[in-house]
Amino acid sequence: MLLAGGLSAVFLDFGPSSPVATVLPSTSARFLLTGLLFAGTGSLIALSPIGRLSGAHLNPAVTVAFWTQRKVHPHDLVGYITAQLLGAITACAVLRLVWGRTAQVLHLGATQPGHGFSDVAVAGIETAMTASLVLMILFMTSSTRTARWTPLGNWLLVAVLVWQGAPYTGTSLNPARSLGPALVAPLLTNLWPYLVGPLAGALVAAGIFGFFPHVNTITAKIFHDPRYGSTLGSDLPTATTSPHIPHR
């Protein structure tokens, strides 16, 4: 669902004969619009019933970050990442059929380095951008006052990162988001920075978060709803747990 909505925004805003380009000729403005739509899709999923049940990570980097905080069991770490990758590949296969030539021209929205940027530079930029995203999520989910606003924070920050970072790296922030188009297009050149960078960013964020020993994540869900149980760790009450008893 994330890639179906997000990449459709890419195709709509930057495809051949795009109607959006007529209204918004500025490439920068279309990057911002694309970021708002792409990130908005993820935030809406987090607020949906299936997102409230699963935790709506949608991104291996986010799951790895919560695993470092002991909020994701190793079995679930493998399960979530497998589901994220399979979901991304499935979405791209469907998008290739739905969008046809537009999807092919844009290589299914595959992330590629901007002109003059090396793979190492792209990996570094992706690491920094993903670290900022993961840090925001970890801090937001560390307080009952801010946890409910995590989808809003995700929407705004990712939109800004796409707006400012897309000309340089395509702004992946998510190994699944890059792997799906790369495999289906196929376009496997320059793929490794988009796998290594976001995962490294998650670990960097976890390391920085560790310098705040009195701040701890209280839920691994992007939007915590006590009516929905989960295998993810939580210090908040859910339908299947008691308050203040971390799950697993």
Image (cartoon, rainbow, N blue to C red):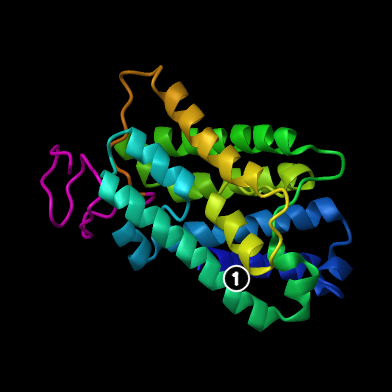
Residue 11 position, x and y percent, is 73, 69
Where does residue 177 sit, x and y in percent of width and height? 58, 57
Residue that numbered label 1 is attached to = 92
Instruction: Tell me the quarter of the picture where residue 100 sits.
Output: bottom right
Residue nearer the viewer, 47 or 187: 187
Residue 63 image offset from top left, x and y in percent: 40, 46
The quadrant the C terminus occupies is top left
- The reply to whether residue 55 is in sight is no
Looking at the picture, how far across and down is residue 240, in whole percent?
Answer: 13, 55
Q: Secondary structure at mark 1?
A: helix
Residue 225 part of the magenta-drawn span: yes
| In-front residue for pair 192/50 | 192
Pointer 1 local density, CA inside 10 Å: few below 14, some 14–19, many at least 20? many
Three-letter amino acid code at the position of disc 1: Cys
Residue in front for this viewpoint, 87 or 171: 87
Q: Main secondary structure of the magenta part?
A: loop
Q: Which residues are magenta?
A: 222-248
Residue 189 appears in view? yes
| Residue 169 is covered by the magenta coloring | no
Please state if 196 lies on the left or on the right of 85 as rendered. right
